[in-house]
Amino acid sequence: MVLKIDVIACLSDNYAYLLRDEESGAAVVFDAPEAAPILDAVAASGGRLDALLLTHHHGDHIEGAAEIVGRTGAELIGAAADAHRLPPLGRAVTDGESFAVGPLGLRGMATPGHTRGHIVYYAPAARALFSGDTLFSLGCGRLFEGSAEDMWDSLLRLAALPPETFIYPGHEYTASNGRFALSVDPDNAALAERLAEVEALRAAGRPTVPVTLKRELLTNPFLRAGDPRLAGRLGLAGRPAVEAFAELRRRKDTFR
């Protein structure tokens, strides 16, 4: 396979992604914030779309699903645990389930925290994780339905993926996430370097993703809640990592 991934800007700060095998023409899209830019990207890549995969039920991730499916005939795929709040699914995926769309191999991973039924998709051949609103560059999703324990467990699962995995999140939040990260981790040289890069990319109107998991493990405070140095800065030295994570999430929710 010759795999290509297009980043599709939607709404004010959402992303969808088009994964295509250039040899077979098989193509899938992850999330559907709005139809027009996604349909334009599909048309520019040859007009074929085999499946549309949804990460969770929030409107800014499913708004364009009906039109995209209606226009392309794509199979709609989402989490079995969230099927009752998603548009009618052609395939309902369970946690850990491996499946294929043509030659494209994928694995669903349940990541409760942002929502109870959130799922992410890992594409091993593409070295890509489509992380929805669970994992952002330099950040993670708000806890709208799940607990800190839920989200921390979900992030640990993602952190165990191969470090060369590229992260494709659902939003362009990296600059604001980076400013918060630097406020709690001011001596992190890798973080300062990443934030400078992010500011340059945004000034040029370019996306800040994808980014490797390896880099996120060095710079994202929500993945580093188990680091004793970071816990110490939070006044939680010696406490369980999930408590440091919960404190980070609490501070981020009120950060300006």
Image (tube, rainbow, N blue to C red):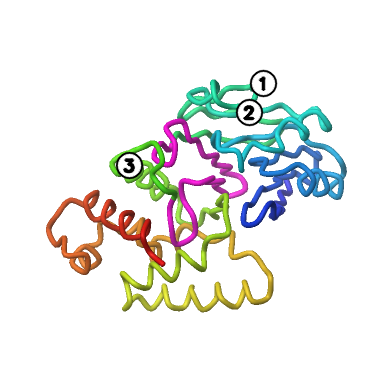
What crowding class fits label 3: few (fewer than 14 Cα within 10 Å), some (14-19), or many (20 or more)? some
Q: Position of residue 226 (x, y in %)?
A: 25, 56
Q: Please tell me in which quadrant of the rendered image residue 178 appears.
A: bottom left
Range of residues picked out in magenta: 111-140
Q: Position of residue 58 (x, y in %)?
A: 55, 38
- Check the image and report above or below for 217 versus 73: below
What crowding class fits label 2: few (fewer than 14 Cα within 10 Å), some (14-19), or many (20 or more)? many
| Type of the residue with mark 3 | Asp
Q: Is residue 139 magenta?
A: yes
Judging depth in this view, the residue of 247 and 136 nearest the camera is: 247
The reply to whether callout 1 and callout 2 are in contact (CB within 8 Å) is: yes
Q: Position of residue 75 (x, y in %)?
A: 72, 26
| Type of the residue with mark 2 | Ile
The residue that mark 3 highlights is 153
- Check the image and report above or below for 163 versus 74: below
Of mark 3 and mark 2, the one earlier in the sequence is 2
The reply to whether callout 1 and callout 3 are in contact (CB within 8 Å) is: no
Q: Position of residue 43 (x, y in %)?
A: 86, 45
**Separation (CA) of disc 1 from disc 3:** 29 Å
Q: Is residue 216 magenta?
A: no
Q: For this view, does 21 lie left or right of residue 150?
A: right
What crowding class fits label 1: few (fewer than 14 Cα within 10 Å), some (14-19), or many (20 or more)? few
Q: Please tell me in which quadrant of the rendered image residue 191 appears.
A: bottom left
The residue that mark 2 highlights is 77
Q: For this view, does 90 lie left or right of residue 110?
A: right
**Separation (CA) of disc 3 from disc 2:** 24 Å
Label 3, secondary structure: give it.
helix
Q: Residue 90: give its label.
A: 1
